[in-house]
Image: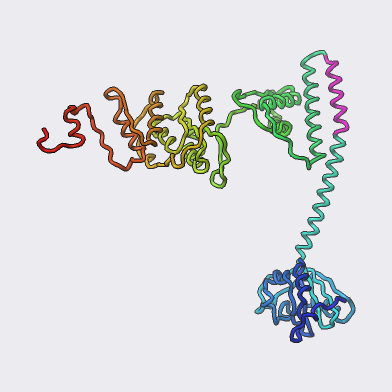
Amino acid sequence: MLRNPFIEGAVAGAPVAAPFVSSMLDQMPNSVLVFVGATKDLVYANAAAEASLDLSRKSLQGLTLYDLFGENQSLNHMIDEVFAGRAAAQRQELVLYSVPGKIYREPLAVHVVIAMLEDPTLMMMEWFPIDQQLRSERDERVSHQVEANKQLMRNLAHEIKNPLGGIRGAAQLLEFELPEKGLREYTQVIIKESDRLQTLVDRLLAPHRKAHAMEPLNIHEVLERIRSLVLAEFPQGLKIIRNYDTSLPDILGDQEQLIQAVLNIVHNAAQALSDEIRRGTAQIELRTRVARSVTIAKQRHRLALDLHLISDIRMPRGNGIDLLQHVKASHPDLPVIIMTAYSDLESAVSSFQSGAFEYLTKPFDIDKAVELIHRAVGEGKRSPGANKESNAWLQEAPEIIGQAPAMQEVFRAIGRLSRSHATVLINGESGSGKELVASALHKHSPRADKPFIAINTAAIPKDLLESELFGHERGAF
């Protein structure tokens, strides 16, 4: 029998839980209810019971066992057995239903424990959801299964490693005995694959170890190794075509895993071509290409950039101007070099107004590009607010068109000068476009919303120029 912890806190004849008992029961994950008297009035519910019944303690006040669960024959039988003294406690799985018109909630599939307290008028009811018990049992089964699988892998790995050493040793001895270089190449394939399999087995034996470090590797060497393996398996009837992009640089990767992944793909292709292999017409092409695109999750993350950034303008899934503006929002002092093969005034001015360090047109001189990068890396911090964004001009048509290198220099000059307040002198022969350049400078300057008047001073006599520009009083002449 359980000691009665409710007598200590009795108030006005109604048993309540002593504070230390209430605190202890509230920490329990299982639901606990305490009833009193023949009518089984509810006098206590712990926090788990409140959550399970979806009712607060205040709402539970004055309710009886019948109010909560109705005429539940299985539950009543358990209570009768305990009250009759035939058992100190009863345990059973059953479903608790709410009473229509009183409490509205889903039925509770629970494991119930009924026990009498020391005071014969008090009864404690404890339960926990069956699905919780099932989850616990399932987790335990899964844990045992995982451990069994680990042991199986360890046993399997050891069984593989034992003959693997013999295979590798035999291949090395065979290599010394073979007179032809072509045959010795096959023994090298066996040795390398034995080493690769050894690495995979070691990973099975120690899955808790840190992932293999990424190392620079030549993807074409990986493909050549795969080609040797496949041709050794299919010496006749299968032709493997190599279509490599030699400009592809070294990549960071796990060589063993990469070989395994690509080898599986090539094996699948060879199996799908079994009929063609028998006829001697099967071909598999190993092709590499340089992917010239990048995706940056700029919506949710702050870009982590350092030193400098080089970006193209036109890209498959975005443009460099948008990227430049986003980078400048988070890294205002980062030098950004914009390069493009589509050289026009809009691109140049847009780049500089968005904060580009320099505008580089393709094709460009490598030495000049390297020098430009060195200057960008050494660039100090710029004054805040120097790069004022203005995109209204994007909606208008370009006023100057040109692809020649000299025109690219003009575009860059317009882009740089349009952000300053300096006085600009534009030199050039008649008809070379001085007025167009002046108009472009004004259009992309901070004073673009102010009036702009172009005056052909060469057409005005020098004696009248001052009066034309600044006016004169009547009779001055």
The stretch in magenta equals 161-178
Residue 406, located in which quarter of the rendered image?
top left
Give me the residue at 81% from left, 77% from top.
Answer: 5
**Residue 10 spot, x, y in % from top left:** 77, 82
Give me the residue at 74% from left, 22% from top.
Answer: 235
- Residue 31 on the magenta span: no
- Residue 230 lies left or right of residue 342; in this view the side is right
**Residue 354 spot, x, y in % from top left:** 44, 38
Residue positioned most to the left: 475
Residue positioned most to the top: 179
Q: Is residue 5 above or below residue 185?
A: below
Pick the front one: 152 or 468: 468
Residue positioned most to the right: 86
Residue 72, located in which quarter of the rendered image?
bottom right
**Residue 351 spot, x, y in % from top left:** 44, 35
Q: Is residue 27 above or below residue 225?
A: below
* Image quarter (top left, top right, bottom left or bottom right) of the C terminus: top left
- Residue 165 on the magenta span: yes
